[in-house]
Amino acid sequence: MNFTEKILVLDFGSQYTQLIARRVREQKVYSEILPYNVSIDRIKEFAPKGIILSGGPSSVYDKSAPLPDKEIFNLGIPILGICYGMQLMSHMLGGKVAKSAKREYGRAELRIDDDSDILKGIKKRSAVSGQRSEEEKLVTVVWMSHGDKIVKQPKGFTPIAHTNNSPVAAMADKSRKFYALQFHPEVAHTENGTKILRNFVFNVCKCKPKWTMQSFIETTTKDIKEKVGKYRVVCAISGGVDSAVTAVLINRAIGKQLTCIFVDNGVLREGEALKVENMLKKHFRMNMICVDASKRFLKKLKGVTDPEKKRKIIGNEFIHIFQEEAKKIKGAEYLAQGTLYPDVIESTSFKGPSAIIKSHHNVGGLLKDMKLKLVEPLRELFKDEVRVLGRELGMPDEIISRHPFPGPGLAIRIIDEVTQQRADILRKADAIVLEEIKNAGLYNEIWQAFAVLLPIKTVGVMGDERTYENVIAVRAVKSVDGMTADWARLPYDVLGIISNRIINEVKGINRVVFDISSKPPSTIEWE
Ligand code: XMP
């Protein structure tokens, strides 16, 4: 990415590394994360205006302690070390780090000894714990998480803040513009954390706030044009946010050189195919191929009840159909994918591919025999930035803020075998759940809401007749990232309307239940 105002974050394995980059970007300054052991040449090529060394789980005295190239301290670029980043600065620049007698974890009161620079403008408040002088009672609350501490700062550094447990909780070498913090300014619990990061980015590194979505669109469309040249790009559209935004952005850059392929696998939500088609084809005037392959998918799914088998069948069939269609497009050289920044970091960071990477990438495995090169214009963005980008590109909110939907679709919400009839029943019930949650104004507070069709028949009574029909389970969860989730406390009235409508309007259902399990130990999907 061709920005001049950039901050580089070197990753030493902290759970907060991504947060540091996000906080910097929130200040409209572009920030990227690279593994701690990236070469000095790569750093020079990236040309940051400042470097932040993240925290990490290691101790600098561990045999395998991750350390950066020492040359970073000779680049003449400001450096901010956070937690482990501070300790390694101390260790590598001649200070002394030792085990704390007491691990310091959580809230701590920071007493500022020099607020002339990076700690400038911090609002202080009265200390809870008693200290003698009035001045000493003024503190700010910070978030700590460390077992080692600085016992002697390196030459050139002076301590600028302390806590009860850390005599050097922050230190500075103003002439070299090196700063180090024992606490985490990037987490929300650190009261003035944003202010401190702003001080580093703007006052120390002299960055200008130029990173906006508009500037991202301009630079990226230029990059795509240059990369793709006269060739064609194909893009698989799943109905989700990422692939739709990818397509709209590439369309902005190369227009008719892009062809989108949308495959209806027969287990999509109600009206989904039409919604996506209307937006991309009619609103954005894109080349779009819509393939109704529902019969083909349902045939393959016949008799299959195992959830993992369903996933594999749908994934493989999708790849086959996509390839068949893509091969028909003359001059196709590139495949567009909606890879996001967290996926990129997960696979390049020194920790290696993390366990949380999802195995269900819809177009994974395509490239081997198709030999398409990749275009991944979102690979520098976080999920919420993709939503901002989509809005900026004029995409309707209905597409941008929709709940996540699994690649295998309704197939993993039909417990037991998937049939056309069952898919139709579930589609109708699911549409009612979503409609009523939207009517109640709750859609945006919920991570995912949907219906599940259970393979159980129960007795009911309708009019004067006894019925013996299936059960629908309603699932609604709140979550931040889908990794953990709590069941959403939907109001009884809303649940009542959902239940009434499903039983009255969906033939084949005579009972509705509400799922009140959290993840863990349950999962969001039932299969
Ligand atoms: P679970 O059920 O594992 O789901 O708690 C976590 C999130 O992942 C989605 N999910 C999938 N997405 N293909 C996908 O594209 C899949 O096979 C799949 N399985 C689960 C799920 O909807 C939730 O958002």
Image (cartoon, rainbow, N blue to C red):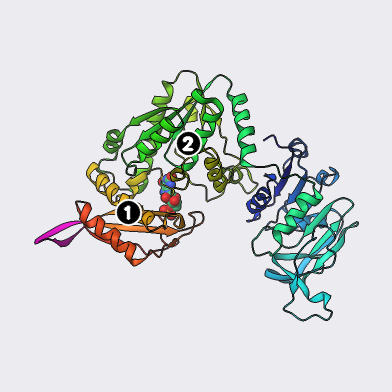
Q: Residues within 10 Å of mark 2 (few under 14, many from 20)?
A: few
Instruction: Mark 1 vs mark 2: give the one in front.
Output: 1
* Label drawn at residue 451: 1
Q: Which residue is drawn at 32% across and 42% down?
A: 267
Residue 250, image x, y percentages = 53, 30
Residue 403, image x, y percentages = 43, 49
* Residue of label 2: 364
Q: Does the magenta stretch include residue 384?
A: no
Q: Residue at x 68, y 64 (%)?
A: 190
Q: Earlier in the sequence, mark 1 or mark 2?
A: 2
- Left or right side of 29 for 451: left
Nearest the eye: 271 or 391: 391
Residue 101, image x, y percentages = 75, 72
Where, by quadrant of the figure, is residue 100 drawn? Answer: bottom right
Q: How far apart are marks 1 and 2 (CA)?
A: 28 Å
Residue 165, image x, y percentages = 76, 72
- For the question of whether residue 105 can be seen, the reply is yes
- Left or right side of 308 for 373: right
| Amino acid at circle 1 | Ala
Magenta range:
456-471
